[in-house]
Amino acid sequence: MALETLKKLGEELYAKLHLPTYPVAVTYIKSEDEIPEQALRPSAMGQKMALCQAFTNARSWGAHTAMTEKDNLCVPSSAMHKWINVTDEEFVESQVRQGWHIDRQAEMNRLAVFNHLFNGEEGRKRLETMKSRIGFVCSPLQNALLEPDTILVFGNGVHTTHLIQALCYDYTSPVFSAFEGFGESCAKGGLLPFVTGRPQLVLPGMGDRAFAGIAPDELAMGIPASMFPKMMEHMFKSGGFMNIGMPFKTMMPSGMSESITPGFAYLRERAEKNK
């Protein structure tokens, strides 16, 4: 898909859905040589940030940010992206020390679920793809510097409903997601749509809330860039004239009178007597 087409569709989505922040273009890179000059690198300034913070830079500030393991303070997310070489046992130990789950077995169970991604021939290809990347560049979609692999869109429940309805309109790739409250925007929002080719609903997790300033009512959708044009073609088509649209249309109550509250009823009675 041509970059200019995706950039225009990003502008269209931002306007049509009245989004509070820009859609984010995420491109996974194989070499630091792919990083554009315009992209900010935290490590170049002697700093580090989390991957979710890079998304906030793009969607809220319109900034271009490049992230590799050198730039990423969230070491577990670097491990899950396969940007660093650690064993499963070392990863589990890091999570046990964090205290996220009840015990070591719970952390082993969690990792086993993630490792299902790499089962079979398709899984082997996914793992090869992940290991071939060393980081990503993210930008606001309408000003993207590189053709994106994933497009990450933040919004509220209504925005997300429209995205899901458009993605599911032809029901060839419905949205199925699992949740655990961690690694949501980075792993589910960015990585999984890239390596699986399937969209993901993101319920921002602990790091997203603590580090990236994601608001309490915000959700997100991670969308493979290849699916983005068709999603835009299907926007607002679900239900035809019954689609809730944007601004969204709600049912207005009818058949009401002043009797709905005692204060209304009292004041109407007094007004009638005072005529």
Image (spheres, helix red, strand yellow):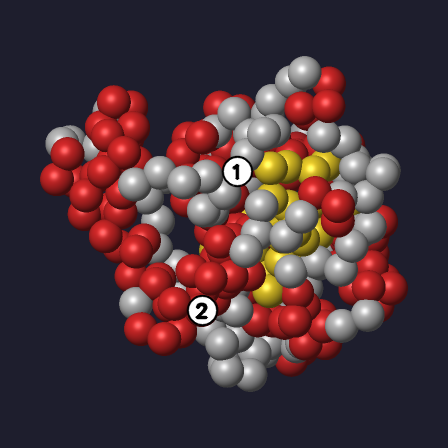
231 and 77: which one is in front?
Answer: 77
Q: At numbered mark 2, what does the secondary structure look like: helix, strand or loop?
A: helix
> Measuring 31% from the left and 73% from the top, which residue is drawn there?
120
Q: In this rendering, does residue 176 appear at all?
A: yes
Q: Of residues 220 and 65, which is closer to you in this image? A: 65
Residue lying at the far top of the rendered structure: 46
Q: Return the mark for residue 125.
A: 2
On screen, residue 201 versus residue 119, left or right, reads right
Answer with the quarter of the image where residue 80 lies: top left
Distance, label 1 to label 2, CA atoms, is 36 Å
User: In percent of the image, x 60 and y 22: which residue is there?
Assistant: 48
Query: Residue 51's spot in the image, x, y percent?
Result: 57, 35
Amino acid under disc 1: Asp
Of callouts 1 and 2, the N-terminal one: 2
Check disc 2 and give the amino acid type: Lys
Count residues near mark 2 (Cα–Cα under 10 Å), then give few for <14, some for 14-19, many for 20+. some
Mark 1 is surrounded, within 10 Å at the Cα level, by few (under 14), some (14 to 19) or many (20 or more) other residues, namely few
Residue 138 seen: no
- Write down the residue under mark 1: 217
Residue mark closest to the camera, 1 vs 2: 2
The quadrant the N terminus occupies is bottom right
For the residue labelled by badge 1, is the local secondary structure a helix, a strand or a loop? loop
Q: Residue at x 29, y 23 (%)?
A: 98
Q: Position of residue 190 (x, y in %)?
A: 55, 51
Across and down, in percent, residue 33 comes to: 75, 46
- Up the image or down, 247 lies above or below 84; here it is below
